Image: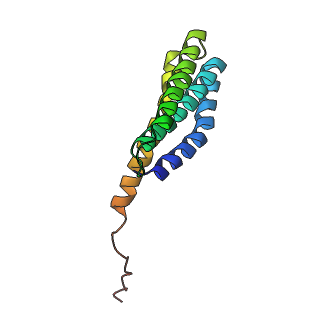
Amino acid sequence: MNLEFLHRSYRSALVVLPVVGLFVFTYLGPMQGAGFALAALLGIVNVRLIEECAVQLIRVGGPRKLRFVLAALLKLVLVYGIGAFLLIRGIGSPAALVAGFSMIFAVIVLKAAGRLYVDRTQPAGPVLERKDSR
């Protein structure tokens, strides 16, 4: 898995979010839909900040400690602070918030599983056409 895979996962999650969010909004109510959508955005930001922390620690030119600390603090304050605010204010049930926050992880797992499936079903070399035996 490389960084481009994660970036494609972010885009896929942003495409899936409105579709699933509309279902939650329609069938569970507006507060559940809002909570789900906000938690899903927080989940995407969370994974992006984790990626930033990892990149800053293991980069080729040596770690950038200040950027790592800034990303970690931003993650702590932004993600957990807004998540706590959503829980305290009752914007969405805890189940809707957990589902929204976990959506990015579901997208990543399903994209990885799909990639594994496609890699196993495609032949390794060039495909040769068979000649009819007529």
Residue found at the very far bottom of the displayed protein: 134
Residue 36's x, y, as percent?
57, 25
Quarter of the image that includes the C terminus: bottom left
In depth, the one of 75 and 100 nearer the eye is 75
In depth, the one of 54 and 19 nearer the eye is 54
| Residue 121 in the image: above or below residue 24 | below
Residue 35's x, y, as percent?
59, 21
In depth, the one of 133 and 121 nearer the eye is 121
Give the residue at x 58% y 34%. Answer: 20
**Can residue 65 be seen in the rendering of this structure?**
yes
Residue 114's x, y, as percent?
41, 51
**Can residue 100 be seen in the rendering of this structure?**
no
Is 14 positioned to the left or the right of 106 in the image? right
Give the residue at x 33% y 87%. Answer: 133
Where is residue 117, by image quadrant? bottom left
The mark total stands at 0
Residue 90's x, y, as percent?
59, 11
| Residue 122 in the image: above or below residue 57 | below
Give the residue at x 48% y 46%. Answer: 6
Where is residue 108, by image quadrant? top left
| Residue 56 in the image: above or below residue 92 | below
